[in-house]
Image (cartoon, helix red, strand yellow):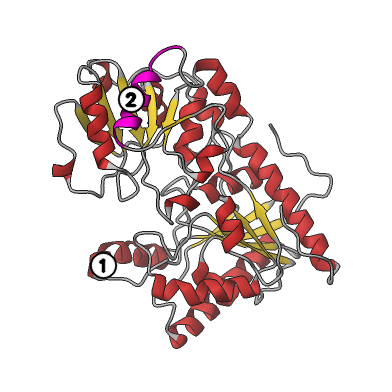
Amino acid sequence: MPIHRERPISAFVVFGDDWGRHVSTLQHLFGRIAQHATVIWINGIGQREPSLSDIGRALQKLGAMIRRDRARSSPSARGRMAPPQHIIEPRVLPWHSNRLVSAINRASLKRDIQMSLKRAGVGDFVMVTGSPPSANVIGECGESASIYFCMDDFLLLPGTSPRMIAPLEQELLRRVDAVVATAQRLVETKVSVSGRGFYLPQGVNYEHFATGRATPAELRDLPRPIVGFAGGVGPAVDLATLHAICETIPNGSVVLVGPVTVPRESLVAPNLHVFGPRPYEDLPAYVQAFDVGIIPYVENDWTRTVDSLKLLEYLAAGVPVVASPLPEVRKYSSAVLTARLGREFAEAVKANLAPSGSARGEVAQAFAANHSWERRAARLLDIVDEVCVAKSRPGGPPMRG
């Protein structure tokens, strides 16, 4: 579904993650928008205070700053995506809560943004940020409007620094003209001073996951059925449920494809296969080999704000899904089977192997096609229009959508 605009937005400056390193929500969206508007992308500026374990990553970033490398979209991220026209490797220090560091970072970012705007010949533009540490730049670069694109509750997200992020996010909410969030709970809890908030769920790279692929060699000889999870195996995943599935389907295989941040010894069972991360371009082949895709997430304050990318990816691949009954899963209840963790979840997986289970094949794919990133990007541009119009007419009621 191409994006058509009667009144196209000419340019965006986006605080995101490192372009091409991981195909994230903002990259999916602005990879579509970049086909129709100028996108100046700012690579990640950090969400937590650094520790000794971050030295290697810091050296990589430093090398990129010195070389002024420009990331390029990898083959895995392309399809209908386009790379940003300008990518800024930010020259910032990660101690964002320090006033002196904050002032230095602000000056550096403003200079880089203004230089990129000048090179691009951009006048009016909209600032979009998914990063609370960007707060002190919002409103400082002459943008027409600013939006906080919120995909997680950073105060609850493992691996971030709530002590550092909390005041930065409050300052960001004070400065931005609107909040766009991927979970309804985030729309309710991350409220800007303007009162403008919009709900934009995750989308799916439909063609990437729906186009048929050959089964990877390492899966071909595994006993069927294959119950699969494609994503990070970390604190959100209930390990006891994984083992319950192994026990309930002893003659099948449980496959984990993605980075693992839990102890490997907690993932040992005769029919449990841990493959680790695979390139994004190869991921559809693994997902399409699943007989059931699972999302066994624990329920807590953090996961209640999570809208999982993998759910629609499973459906686009034609794979039936069993998931925990989290708030952002319930909106897909017509296509997905939900179950409580543990034995009930394992039994639901077993039941979903039958043809009478949840959406699969062409039915699942047709459902996923209605939630493509092209549609989400078009909706984001509509939201930007609404925010710009509302900002030009101060005094109206708060916008919530």
Q: Position of residue 243 (x, y in %)?
A: 22, 34
Q: Quadrant of residue 157?
A: bottom left
Left or right of 373: which side holds 17? left
Q: Is residue 35 visible?
A: no
Taking depth in this image into account, of 235 and 348 the one nearest to the observer is 348
Q: Secondary structure at mark 2?
A: helix
The residue lying at 41 percent from left, 62 percent from top is 156
Taking depth in this image into account, of 177 and 62 the one nearest to the observer is 177
**Quadrant placement of the N terminus:** top right
Magenta stretch secondary structure, dominant: helix
Which residue in the structure is indicated by mark 1?
A: 55
Q: Quadrant of residue 378?
A: top right
Question: Earlier along the polypeptide chain: callout 1 or callout 2?
Answer: 1
Q: Position of residue 177 (x, y in %)?
A: 70, 67
Q: Is residue 388 magenta?
A: no
Which residue in the structure is indicated by mark 2?
A: 347
